Image: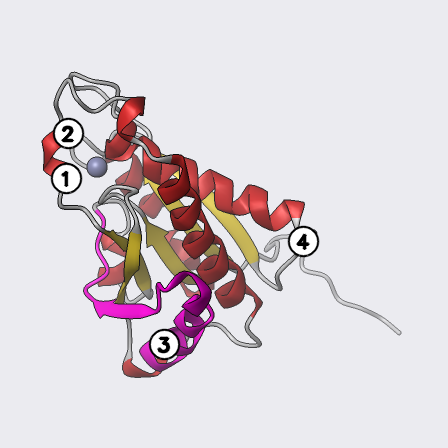
Amino acid sequence: MLIAVNFDQPMEALVVLLSGHLDSWDVGQGAMDDGGGAAISWEALSLIRDLGLRPKRTLRTVLWSAEEPGGVGAAQYFQQHKGNISNFDLVMESDLGTFSPLGLQFTGSDKARAIMKEVMKLLAPINVTSLEKHGEGTDINMWMKAGVPGASLHTADQRYFWFHHSDGDTMTVQNPEEMNLCSAVWAVVAYVVADLEEMLPR
Ligand SMILES: [Zn+2]
């Protein structure tokens, strides 16, 4: 049997992307904006690895640089990877605080939304089943505008602007139990979507 391999075009990974931005520049430490989003995106992969799970598609965490000056890192990443846009299954960003999770904000087709609703039912044990509208995030907007399904984490963020870009945004505002719940939501959504038989329909 002869197997043809085209070395000129290596097969690009099919990707579920998890992300937060790692570029505190203002006063404070940027723990909530957006250290928390970066940490849970890292922790989700760590959890999945610790559990010995390996989904069908690649899970990729991106810790964005230069979001605060205007999404510079995300724009560069988009330029470098948009040629493989059909390989991006779901893009996720947490940038609204890592307080107690309430649900997932989602942008995608009706068919994709119906699938995501089912995925969120898996989170009933921690009572985070709500699938809302309007996925958002400076760093994932370009992908969503180009038709890639996108998700952002909605948390009980009433206190977000107490700390946002202030001297108060330090590690002490992070609650480890709430961050664990955020990591759990991130891990379940990313893993399950990456392990579905098919990619989310556009
Ligand atoms: Zn931010």
Can see residue 201?
no
Question: What percent of the width, then of the height, locates residue 199?
Answer: 48, 72
Q: Ligand 1 quadrant?
A: top left
Circle nearer the N terminus (1, 4): 4
Q: Is residue 44 above or below residue 154?
A: above
Instruction: Report which residue position mark 4 lands on.
Output: 7
Question: Which amino acid, mark 4?
Answer: Phe
Question: Which amino acid, mark 1?
Answer: Arg
Circle nearer the N terminus (4, 3): 4
Q: Residues under labels 3 and 1: Cα distance?
A: 28 Å
Question: Which amino acid, mark 2?
Answer: Phe
Residue contact at pointers 2 and 1, CB within 8 angstroms:
yes
Q: Is residue 158 above or below residue 39?
A: below
Q: Nearer the viewer, residue 95 or 15?
A: 95
Question: What percent of the width, then of the height, locates residue 181?
Answer: 41, 49
Q: Which residues are magenta?
A: 113-137
Q: Indicate which disc residue 159 carries.
A: 1
Q: Residues under labels 2 and 3: Cα distance?
A: 32 Å
Name the secondary structure under disc 2.
helix
Mark 1 close to ligand 1, CB under 8 Å: no
